[in-house]
Amino acid sequence: MSTVTDRQGPVRFCRRDLEAAGLASRPLLIHTVPMKSRLLIPRLRSRQRTLLHMYRTVADFTYDLEIWMEAGGPLRYVSPSCLRVTGYPAGEALRDADFFARIIDADDFVKWRQAMDTGHAQDIPAMDFRICRRDGTRIWLSQETTRVFDPRGRFQGWRLSLRDVTERVQTRICLDQARQNLAERVRERTAELELSRERYRALSGYLQDRIEKERAHISREIHDILGQDLTAMNMGLHRLERSFHDPDDGRLAQLAELRALVAGTLETVRRISRELRPPMLDELGFVEAVAWQIRTFAQASGLRVDQQLGHLPDLPGDLATAMYRVLQECLTNAARHSGCSRLHVSVQAGDGEFVMRVADNGRGITSDQAESSGSLGLLGMRERVRLAGGSLAIARLPKGGTEILVRVPLTGESGSCDCS
């Protein structure tokens, strides 16, 4: 029996009673027992048993596998759920110093061991790994790791919470495989579409080239055959007219009508021939052909066209033809759809780039119209420019009207239109 005096007066306690209660080594729980409170010891014992029972109930009946591992590696506690999760009883796991090495898949154990070796200094992130159960089946476990410290902050070990996530991992693996399969199919389809697009572009270029060649051929045929025949017919009518000596002969009026008809037809033939393939495009070059096209368009449409034609280097024939056709389509669209009264055409070259700009003061194109796939004219323009390696932009001007801007590089292979 001992006596200690504190602020409340003398306190007597029995060391044997404390030891019997299992409290002698727990100074934080009880330091002194007043003599009058010796009857509290049975109640404290009961309370301790209750708390221990509650703790064991929580620990032993947890669904996940709960393990307390000391810093040196030995297992201090394994919950009974070890049997359900791994197939091994908790007691057997406690006695096996290499329990984790025995159950964790060899490929995953290296990763697990490395994480645990560094876990005393830093938090260990959640990780999934495979284990082999006692019956030989393989499952996936997810481990959540919490570092354990004593009241003085000294590292004591880890609390491991392990859950069977086999179904989740298998689902994830199936989803990953499905995503990989889908990605592979997308890549295959993309490659097929890209190949199809390249073939389409090659075919489009080939058709554009064939169309231009056919235009040139028809233009020559019309000019050389129909033009010559109509000229000969006109000359024959003129000779026939001169063979009549009587100026009052009524047949002279008929001959004059025929000659006028032939002359008009001859002019129409020449116009069609020029529209099919302007001879000045081959004879005088791109700038002169553009100037002629602008004059012809202005006369036919009655619209005012301001032009700014800079000095251009010699353009390759296929590129000159493509840009000429784009200009034709720009002017035609402006006359048909814009409701404009004035246009501005600028053709320049500089810094290795061909630049053509056509702007009008009409109602202005909408974004839907500019991106519409139903306009064959716009599609044809875009395709010609793309085949030339350039870009075409269509925009609505802030003050109204539409601007079409074409840029084509003049250096390297992209300076020519690949229409073969």
Image (cartoon, grey):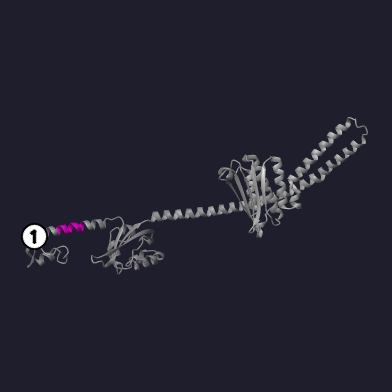
Find residue 332 and report its horizontal and vertical position in percent. Answer: 66, 43
**Mark 1 — residue?**
37
Badge 1: few (under 14), some or many (20 or more) residues near its Cα, within 10 Å? few
Q: Quadrant of residue 147?
A: bottom left
Q: Amino acid at mark 1?
A: Ser
Q: Answer whether residue 199 is visible to the viewer in this image.
A: no
Which residue is the extreme one toward the bottom? Answer: 72
Seen from the viewer's position, the closer of residues 314 and 149 is 314
Residue drawn at 10 percent across, 59 percent down: 40
293 within the magenta span: no
Seen from the viewer's position, the closer of residues 196 and 236 is 236
Q: Quadrant of residue 68?
A: bottom left
Q: Quadrant of residue 129?
A: bottom left
Seen from the viewer's position, the closer of residues 400 and 86 is 400
Q: Which residues are magenta?
A: 45-53
Q: Secondary structure at mark 1?
A: helix
Residue 314, compared with residue 101, is above or below; it is: above
Residue drawn at 71 percent across, 46 percent down: 293
Residue 390, compared with residue 266, is above or below; it is: below
Q: On the rendered image, what quadrant is the C terminus found in?
A: bottom right
Residue 61, compared with residue 377, is above or below; it is: below
Left or right, residue 206 beside residue 233: left
Residue drawn at 90 percent across, 39 percent down: 239
Q: Answer whether residue 274 is visible to the viewer in this image.
A: yes
Which residue is the extreme one toward the right? Answer: 245
Find residue 50 and report its horizontal and vertical position in percent. Answer: 18, 56
Majority secondary structure in the magenta region: helix
Find residue 287 and report its horizontal and vertical position in percent. Answer: 71, 52
Seen from the viewer's position, the closer of residues 317 and 254 is 254
Q: On the rendered image, what quadrant is the N terminus found in?
A: bottom left
Q: How many marks are shown on the rendered structure?
A: 1
Find residue 12 and report its horizontal and vertical position in percent. Answer: 7, 65
